[in-house]
Amino acid sequence: MTITKIPTPAPTVSTRRRARRPRRPAKTAGAYLLLMTLAILFAGPFAWLVLAALKTKAEWVSIPAKLLPEAPRWDNFTQALTEINFAAYLGNSMFLSFLYAILVTFSSAAVGFGFARLRGRGKRPLFVLLLSTMMLPQILTLIPTYVLFARVGLINTYWPWVLWGLAASPFLVFLFRQFFAGIPAELEDAAIIDGCGYGRIFLQIFLPLSRPVLLTSFLLSFTWIWGDYLGPALFLDPDQTTLSVAISAFYLDPHGNPDSTVQAAAAALYVVPVLVIFLFAQRYFIRGVVSSGLKG
């Protein structure tokens, strides 16, 4: 009697996937643990700021330092809102941030479109020269910029932010250039055949397609001006200045010393608008960065 040996079937793709499935929960748990650890590390400074805002002045200077306040002082936030004209300085910060963000987003998109889709001699060296300007620290050009604006009478006005916005940003130009370079050329050729010029192609075709990058550019440029201290401190008088300068200079105790706990409360309130904007727009922000970085 002959016994026929039935061959063992080779493992299929689904079988291999089922065999590796028990390892996935461990990897997922490790990834979540890493993300939670990073989230705690990044949220630590803001949490410390809020706790500092709830302390008394004695707890602020106590040695050894106390992490938690014994009795939270919520009136520090009330004092931060009433001790100075908080709403006016907040409005100045909002106005300058929105003004610059809108102008620099549009100008950077236009320059990025030119580098991505237009043809011309010397375009690549010019793009490299533009990117090389990102290596110049802002502090290096601060004094020449101040002297220039002072000689033409633009100090204590909002015109410096208008000119900076119209001048475009090298980093944002790079983002838009990378995104526009990934759009199929057939779309541009079809528009040219239909009689569209490059201005109409940019405004009616490329800009609507670049919404994630537009929002990313707007958020980045908004936070640049929102957190800027040197620019408003140099170019604006105390009545026109922004909230960042007001927080650092105008919260004083009766002896003329910085009122640290009230400053911490004001700084915590100062961070809230940016956090709210990012929480609502983080999906588009990440999508814009990823789509710009992968295309070229």
Image (cartoon, rainbow, N blue to C red):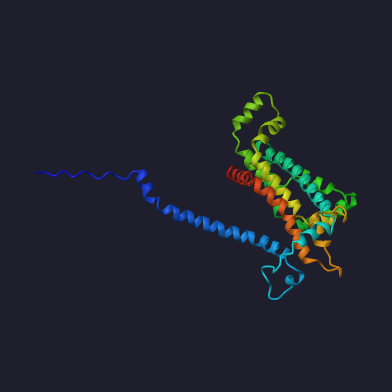
Residue 45 position in % (x across, y down): 67, 62
- Residue 49, above or below 224: below
Quarter of the image with the N terminus in it: top left
| Quadrant of res 115 | top right
Pick the residue in front: 242 or 143. Answer: 242
- Residue 115, above or below 29: above
201 left or right of 144 in image: left
Q: Which residue is at 73% across, 63% downward? A: 53
* Viewer can see residue 125: no
Q: Which residue is farthest left?
A: 1
Pick the residue in front: 184 or 33. Answer: 33
Q: Which residue is farthest bottom?
A: 63
Residue 56 position in % (x across, y down): 75, 68
12 left or right of 231 in image: left
| Quadrant of res 208 | top right
Quarter of the image with the C terminus in it: top right
* Viewer can see residue 103: yes
Residue 5 position in % (x across, y down): 18, 45
Q: Tally the numbered discs.
A: 0
- Residue 211, above or below 238: above
Pick the residue in front: 249 or 61. Answer: 61
| Quadrant of res 237 | bottom right
Residue 11 position in % (x across, y down): 32, 45
Pick the residue in front: 61 or 186. Answer: 61
Q: Which residue is farthest top?
A: 194
